[in-house]
Amino acid sequence: MHIPPETSNRRTSRDSGRRVKHVSRSCQECRRRKVKCNGVTPQCSGCIDRRVACDYSGEPDRRHTRRLMQALKTSNERQEARIQQLLTYLENLGAPIPPAPESSSEPETRGVAEAVQRQGDA
């Protein structure tokens, strides 16, 4: 008999009399199918029922995810500061600054790049 990894008992608000086992990790197949995994190794019951390989590798490390998010946030803040510096530079040169797009999720950089190029050629 296999014991599920890192399980704990939790009560649900729906059925306060029953204990629900929480599995902290799921196999790749259950994640892909977005179904509850019982976490039994080497093969969970869902994979046994579906007769597919059960693989627990490739689980995301939340610590790395937090670090990545912080790095992306820092990079974004630096890029925004650099854009502001460039806009200030263009204003000081008297170059027209194109308006920011209203509904686009990507910044409009072509106009700024062309203005900087024209100033460099002058």
Image (tube, rainbow, N blue to C red):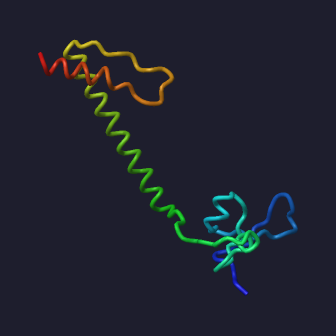
Residue 13, position in %: x, y? 82, 58
Residue 91, position in %: x, y? 25, 16
**Residue under the point 70% across and 74% down:** 44
Q: Nearer the viewer, residue 79 or 15?
A: 79
Residue 49, position in %: x, y? 76, 71
Question: Which quadrant holds the N terminus?
Answer: bottom right
Q: Nearer the viewer, residue 122 or 61?
A: 122
User: Going by the picture, which residue comes out furthest to the left?
Assistant: 122
Question: Which quadrant holds the C terminus?
Answer: top left
User: Going by the picture, which residue comes out furthest to the front?
Assistant: 51
User: Going by the picture, which residue comes out furthest to the bottom?
Assistant: 1
- Image check: 92 left or right of 17? left
Total count of labels: 0
**Residue under the point 38% across and 50% down:** 71
Would you identify the image quadrant in which residue 99 lies? top left
Q: Nearer the viewer, residue 89 or 13?
A: 89
Would you identify the image quadrant in which residue 68 lies? bottom left
Residue 36, position in %: x, y? 72, 63
**Residue under the point 64% across and 59% down:** 32
**Residue under the point 64% across and 75% down:** 6
